[in-house]
Image: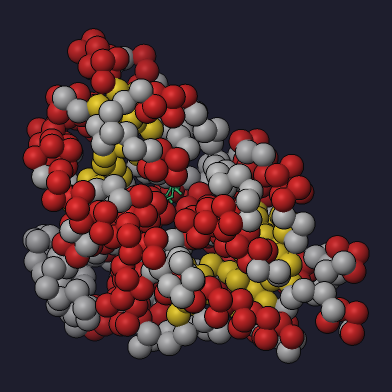
Amino acid sequence: MEEQQSLPPHVLIFPLPLQGPVNSMFKLAQLLCYSGLHITLLLTENIYNRLVLHTDITSRFDHQFHGLQIKTISDGLHDDHPREGSKFMEVFESLRTKTKMLFKDMLTSDLLCDGGRRRRVGCIIADGILGFTCDVAEEIGVPVFCVRTISPCCLWIFFCLPKLIESGEYPFKDDDLDEPIRSIPGTETFLRRRDLPGFCRSGDLEDSNIQLFEIEGQENSRGYGLLLNTFEELDSPILNQMRTICPNLYPIGPLHANLKKKLTIENTSSRSSSSSLWTEDRTCIDWLNNQLPNSVIYVSFGSVATMTNEQLMEFWYGLVNSGQRFLWVIRPDSIPGEDWKTKIPADLAMGTKERGYIVGWAPQEEVLAHPAVGGFWTHCGWNSILESVYEGKPMICWPYFLDQQVNSRFVEKVWELGLDMKDTCDREIVEKMVKDLMVVRKDEFLERANHMSKLAKNCLMEGGSSYSNFERLVKDIKSLSDKV
Ligand code: UDP
């Protein structure tokens, strides 16, 4: 026991097996490692295999982060299960029913102790939506912190779903999606039905999404505290609302920038190790190097969103007709069932050759930090928004699902950092919005974006809000682990 106590506290981090959560939890793992803790990052086998295929994680972590070990666990599904956005409920169910027992066995064995070189796990940080991790933590007497990597503004709506139902505002009484929503504290003046998470449109109280997210308030308050990838200066009003349900919040973001800063201080390569599930095409950086400052709109709809061939055409014509330069990420699986490359109209091919560049996956953080990029047309995934906010890039928002519908409303109406394009997909609207963002209202948006970017940078400086919250987190982890 005494020998054990002389070793650093050992924390297990378990992200949801999706690109966004994996990205941010990788960063958290490295940051906690720099703070002198031993970390086990637990990934599903499927995620781990994809990371090995597309990144240098194994070699990089062996050299740089001795305190960080990666372990894998089965998600309980067959190898050929698609695990894509539309099938995520199946992944989720399998994690809940099959992975739970494996998780418990792992924590109660010596498997994570590295032959005595690590303490037993003294603290768990798990995605708050994986409620079974709290069950196991309670059963074995290990403290747990919940972490949510979606936006706090959407999480707050999840917390309020029971209230929304009680008030009679949900399910909607008619088809008018512009009707204001009044029963969610703090959002009464700007939230409409269409800004609620996409699954709310089903109007079905038995919908598996409603059933899952309706208990978020309860589930996320089960831990010692709730970690959020945001910063006080961006989300203060919503965080104050959330504290009425989860008093102990740790807003410690933007995590990607926090890590970048740490790597610079530690004099390591300031480019953090990629945790991409696709291979990054770095030729787009060469292309950006040849463009004028603020002249390019970067277009990416993240790792899950898909579009139809018709939507692709509307977007593409809109972009080309705007006359602006663009860098566009179209993943190999962005247009399901279509080989879009075989039928590109000649005028689009020509316009793209003149002013555009298309890749299958980009080093997004680097792209957004590039001086040539003047705007970001995004699906509003929370990581993408934080990356854009940090780099001071205004946004056009085309939300796809979940928190993205909420985030896009906040981008336009609360933070005033861009334009919300939700529920439209028309080449004329795309053309107008791109011109508005990049030309007509460029100065106005850049001024707001630069201001928010400064706040994001300041919160990570010594004494800044996220800096201090992170210090508090490390202190709390150490003292809780010592009691286990
Ligand atoms: N990303 C990337 N290259 C791309 C597109 C996305 O590296 O070409 C990264 C992006 O930087 C972000 C993550 O993938 O960290 C996407 O997460 P987000 O929360 O924005 O959306 P999701 O993919 O979960 O819908």
In this view, the residue in front, 64 or 198, is 64
Residue at x-position 39% and y-position 65%: 458
In this view, the residue in front, 351 or 369, is 369
Q: Residue 199: which quarter of the image?
A: bottom left
On the picture, is 160 further left or further right than 94?
left
Q: With respect to residue 286, does 395 lie above or below?
A: below
On the picture, is 154 further left or further right than 360?
left
Q: Residue 261: where, in percent of width, then height? A: 52, 56
Q: Residue 129: where, in percent of width, then height? A: 49, 69
Q: With respect to residue 233, does 199 lie above or below?
A: above
Residue at x-position 20% and y-position 28%: 324
Count of numbered circles in the view: 0
Residue at x-position 65% and y-position 74%: 124
Q: With respect to residue 13, does 453 lie above or below?
A: above
Q: Residue 300: which quarter of the image?
A: top left
Q: Residue 361: where, in percent of width, then height? A: 46, 33
Task: Name the quarter where the C terminus is drawn.
Answer: bottom right
Residue 295 visible here: yes
Q: Residue 351: where, in percent of width, then height? A: 22, 16
In this view, the residue in front, 321 or 436, is 436
In this view, the residue in front, 461 or 224, is 461
Residue 227 visible here: no
Residue at x-position 41% and y-position 68%: 459
Task: Name the quarter where the N terminus is drawn.
Answer: bottom right
Q: With respect to residue 479, does 200 lie above or below?
A: above
